[in-house]
Image: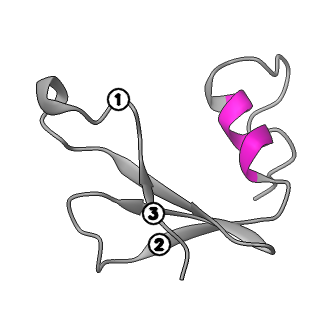
Amino acid sequence: MNTWRKSSYSGPGDGNECVEIANFPTHTAVRDSKAPAGATLTFPAGAFNPFLEALKGRTPGTDLAGFDD
């Protein structure tokens, strides 16, 4: 069983409301830390980091770094 890790931004001063991730050999899963039994968002192996970089604005000229509609 993989261990879910909570974001470092989800601390006492932040209301403990954030996301958790778990890394698997074939994908990365993301879930709401307030509703851990709820749905998860999954990314194929190697796709999660480019997604995060795009969210941080480090990939100019692309919407979601290779994620197409």
Give the quarter of the image for residue 26. Answer: bottom right
Residue at numbered disc 2: 40
State which region is magenta. 48-54
Give the quarter of the image for residue 49. Answer: top right
Element at badge 3?
A: loop
Q: Residue at x 54, y 83 (%)?
A: 1
Q: Is residue 63 above or below residue 34?
A: above
Residue at numbered disc 3: 4
**Relative to residue 46, is residue 18 drawn left or right?**
left
Q: Give the number of marks.
A: 3
Residue at numbered disc 1: 9
Image spot of residue 61 (x, y percent): 85, 20
For badge 1, the amino acid type reads Tyr
**Relative to residue 33, is residue 39 drawn left or right?**
right
Measure the alpha-carbon separation of dots 3 and 1.
15 Å
Element at badge 2?
A: strand
Sequence-first tag of 3 and 1: 3
Image spot of residue 14 (x, y percent): 18, 28
Measure the alpha-carbon separation of dots 2 and 1.
19 Å
- Is residue 55 magenta-colored? no
- Neighbor class of circle 1 (other Cα within 10 Å; few <14, some 14-19, many 20+) is few
